[in-house]
Image (cartoon, rainbow, N blue to C red):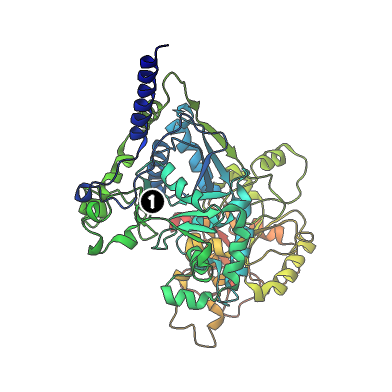
Amino acid sequence: MPLRAKWIALASVCVLSFWNTILQVPSLPLGDHSNSFDHAPPAVTSVSATADEQLHIALALAGREPGVFDEFEAALKSVLLNAPFERSLFVHIFADSNAYKVLDGVLNRTQVTSWETRNQVEIHVYDVQHHIKSLEAQMLETFRPSFPNFTVAYGTVQTIGTWLRLYAHRFIEHDAENLLYIDTDCVIMANLDGIADYIEQRPSALIHWGESMTAGFIGLNIRRMEEMWTIAREAPMKEIATRFKQDLDDQLVFRAINVTRPREVNVIPIEWDMHVTARWTSRYRPFDVKTPNVGMLHFNGGSASKTAYFKPAVSGAKTWMEKFDGTWGNARYYANIPWSWARFIAMGNRRRRSSGFQLKLVSHPAPPLQKISQNKVQFGRKKKTRLATEEKKNRMSFFGNNLSSLFGKNLSSQTVHLLYAADHDAMPGLDASVRSVLKHASERVVIHHVGESPLEPAIFSDVEFHSMDDVHRTHNLTRFTNPHLSSHWSVSRLTSLANYVRFVMADMFPDVGKIMWIDADTIIRCDIVPFFRSALSTSNHTISARLMSGRPLSLKHIEEGETFNAGVMVVNLDRWRARN
């Protein structure tokens, strides 16, 4: 090759190399013309999600309130429509027995299994009812060192649902390190890869939340959840609760971690910390100027209203979304968009020439019912009859449910149902009373016990236990108390909630036609079965009880206005309900 040609070739290589170097130099900020965003959104660079890159999200539900499920649907749509571009998505839904049944209808109606998504998406639904007793024991163990009078009812004034996130390590079978929990009144406004990136910056941290310390949107280290409970138990929670004016609820656990282990907390930026309770003041307005990047919006619905946050206020006052329609009001998009349209949008996010992934729905039902199980109605030994077999197939029910699946009307009028309510101090008397009933009964009786803890299961296998806290939470027993008399010695014993269970037994057992109430300090010295069957069978009265006027010891049917001993009485629940 001629020398001149060699020099030309060499010069061409140098020029191309120099030009390529220029192209790879990142652009520099242009002074006042640069973007003022605090945090730039993450760039999407990869072609497909790596198999080991996953984001786990959790929601929790308790009860059957329609407003809660309206919010849940909006939250779930926002999660699915903002599913990570870079990761597989696993959505975990924790539900008590009531919510689990409702979810079955919701997820069938919305046809989520017909979705085709960019990356793998799985929804796991867990019936965690059988874990609640253990969770409540954990709550007492954690809070009582600082608050000796703490009760489960006090800690679950709003709902037990939010506590379920602190038991996620007991539910989730995946080998995940972190879990992003969101309240049902949250909506996701940006791709979830953004928050996943922040969590992965410090994957070993105990919790990941914003400077507002609001737990409605929080990352949790699943592998260290037992450690979280221990930290809270050993923390000066009384001082922390006073300092932050924090209720005695699950959020106090996270506050305790934040105060005592600040280096174990990963603080996420404000775009993932948009909570109404933290951003309501004027210093954050206009919202789109003060917070140009927004990844989520949390409306902090709480328990003050049973209506979804995006529904019009009953009072006629403007909702938060209506007041700030141009910013917070955009969350309404996820509430309003039909599920079929949302599905089509998700399909549009698939890669070119790819059919995507079929959304997978996995159900995790509760294990078979044990002999003594809190919050569940169950029966003792039965004869091997067709009726007994049918009962066994339908043994479980939660308070307030229709019990017709457990026993039909004929059975409920024939079976002898007895009801006791006893707090801790009355347990010795309850033990003796139940023994006396079983000693003389000529056939099986169904004994219901409402209390703080069950009798010994090995001895009293036929006694069905109902948690006093759950009954109180469902039926609000304190509405029957008289606070003005509670200090007087003669009626101070009436402050026990056990005294007021008898006022809600018609609601607790909606398909039981007749029931007998027995005080825990009562000894039965005869066969109670024939008496129960004959009581109120030939009259139209509602209650059969002993008059207090010194009449013969046999129970007498009473008229309205007469005083009677309510410690032992037979009540026709059908007439009670009919006469309100």
Q: Is residue 544 among the parts visible in the rendering?
A: yes
Is 396 in front, or is 530?
A: 396
Q: Is residue 240 shown above or below 343?
A: below
Horizontal side of 23 relative to 510 (left or right) equals left
Q: Callout 1 environment at 10 Å: few (<14), some (14 to 19), or many (20+)?
A: many
Identify the element where label 1 is drawn. loop
Provide the residue designation for mark 1: 185
Is 202 in front, or is 155?
A: 202
Q: Quadrant of residue 15?
A: top left
Image position, residue 211 (x, y; %): 40, 62
Image position, residue 517 (x, y; %): 61, 65
Q: Is residue 462 shown above or below 237?
A: above
Image quadrant holding the N terminus, namely top left
Is 54 in front, or is 298?
A: 54
For this orientation, the residue located farthest to the top is 1
Horizontal side of 410 relative to 242 (left or right) equals right
Q: Quadrant of residue 46?
A: top left
Q: Is residue 516 among the parts visible in the rendering?
A: no
Type of amino acid under label 1: Asp
Horizontal side of 461 relative to 520 (left or right) equals right
Image position, residue 461 (x, y; %): 75, 56
Residue for point 69% across, 44% down? 368
Image position, residue 35 (x, y; %): 25, 47
Image quadrant holding the C terminus, namely bottom left
Q: Is residue 242 shown above or below 219?
A: below
Horizontal side of 174 relative to 80 (left or right) equals right
